[in-house]
Amino acid sequence: MVRLVLHRDSFEPPLTYTGPVNAVTFSSYPGTYVLTGSSDRAVHLSRAIPTSSNGTVIETTSPIQRYEAHGYSVLDVAVAADNARFASVGGDRQVFLWDVEQGGTIRRWSGHNARVEAVQFAGDGDSVVVSGMFFILSFRSRDQLRQPTIGSADTTINLWDCKSNSHKPIQTLPEARDTVSSLHVHMSTYSIASGSYDGRLRVYDIRMGRTTVDVLAHPVTSVRCSADGHAVLASTLDGRIRMLDRSDGKLLQAFGGGGEKENARREGEERSSFMLGQPGSLVYRNRELRIRSVFARADAVVLSGGEAETVSGNSAAGGQAAVFAWDVLSGEVLAAVPAGQGVKAVSAVAWNEKGGCWAGGCSDGMLPFPLYLLFCSRNFSVGYSMPSISCFSRNTPEFCGILPH
């Protein structure tokens, strides 16, 4: 049984940002830091759970470091296992490999003819480097060089050799017929999962040289493998998140959706009640934007952002965007955390298993001055042997911090 305890106040971030937060990722174990990619063309490094010298939580007012080399929006970011490097991609049509300490780029690969939307590193043991789409993705076996895998808007997935001076990919996977929107590498099974706007979920088995394709009939915006690699989570623009069996493509569980009548009923409730932690008061939507979803709590929970309901093009007049948590087994909504009035969408979420905390990146809609936020909350246990996900207002002492962008 997973119980979620949430504060009754919605988030009230005090900071103003200059562009939407497109990508969010925690640093590698133990996940002390958060990196974000934004339309302000920079990657920001901040502490995930800021603490003072006496161990109490304090609010973060500035990032530790800004990494600026992109000329366009940063769409994805990924961190190496040793936390010494990370990769980023975006509208530059390039893949940037960064040195965290030095603050500069180590390599830049130019092999795509359109924006790059996904990247992640992967490899055996602690040698894995993750980045692409928002991360650079590196794949490596014990006898192979590191090969970052990048998904892009030119419909290809490219594998790059991090140790080579070549600016050309060592392999290209051209099967997608539309934008490759998301990637996830699962090293235990030596496979790469990709989602595309052509409505296909593709899984590449690197060892067997085999590709399996599941047709979802709607643009795929996010893919994520379970820890054991037996299931894949896929978000699509029909407002549903599907968990599929990798072996046969069988639908194991679906999250969101519910049909027009159900959504209409819940939307009516939403206008009259925005009580945090009451799932019925908020409705999951994903019809227009790329929304990320992830597994959490040892694959017992699914987390995802969502879009706000728009009324005559005004998101502030409709229902709020929110972060949703579902029980994997039952498919029921465990909690819904509103991002605040006027926020257009919570576009990216990330989960840190070690720290038991999550972070989300948002963009607003019709506010006079753009407000783009990232929030982070820490996990704690309530009662005997009851894990919980906890979210707090910035005005409460338990709140873990607003991260600047």
Image (cartoon, rainbow, N blue to C red):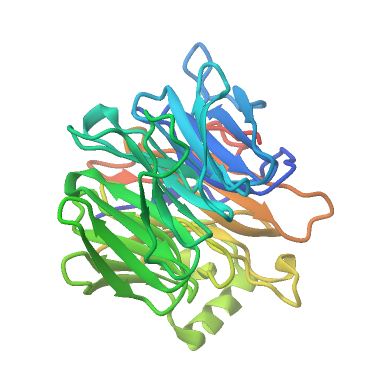
Of residues 26 and 299, the one nearer the viewer is 26
Residue that protrudes farthest toward the bottom in the picture: 261
| Residue 267, horizontal then vertical, whole percent | 58, 77
> Residue at point 26% right, 37% down?
140
> Residue at point 45% right, 76% down?
218
Residue 360 visible in image: yes
Residue 10 visible in image: no
Q: Is residue 367 above or below residue 383?
A: below
Q: Is residue 182 above or below residue 77?
A: below
> Residue at point 66% right, 36% down?
405
- Residue 46 falls in which quadrant of the image? top right
| Residue 79, horizontal then vertical, whole percent | 42, 33
- Image position of 347 (left or right of 150): right
- Image position of 185 (left or right of 48): left
What quarter of the picture does the N terminus occupy?
A: bottom left
- Residue 85 falls in which quadrant of the image? top left
- Residue 382 falls in which quadrant of the image? top left
| Residue 156, horizontal then vertical, whole percent | 44, 58
> Residue at point 72% right, 41% down?
17
Q: How many marks?
A: 0
Residue that protrudes farthest toward the top in the picture: 53
- Image position of 92 (left or right of 251): right
| Residue 377, horizontal then vertical, whole percent | 48, 39
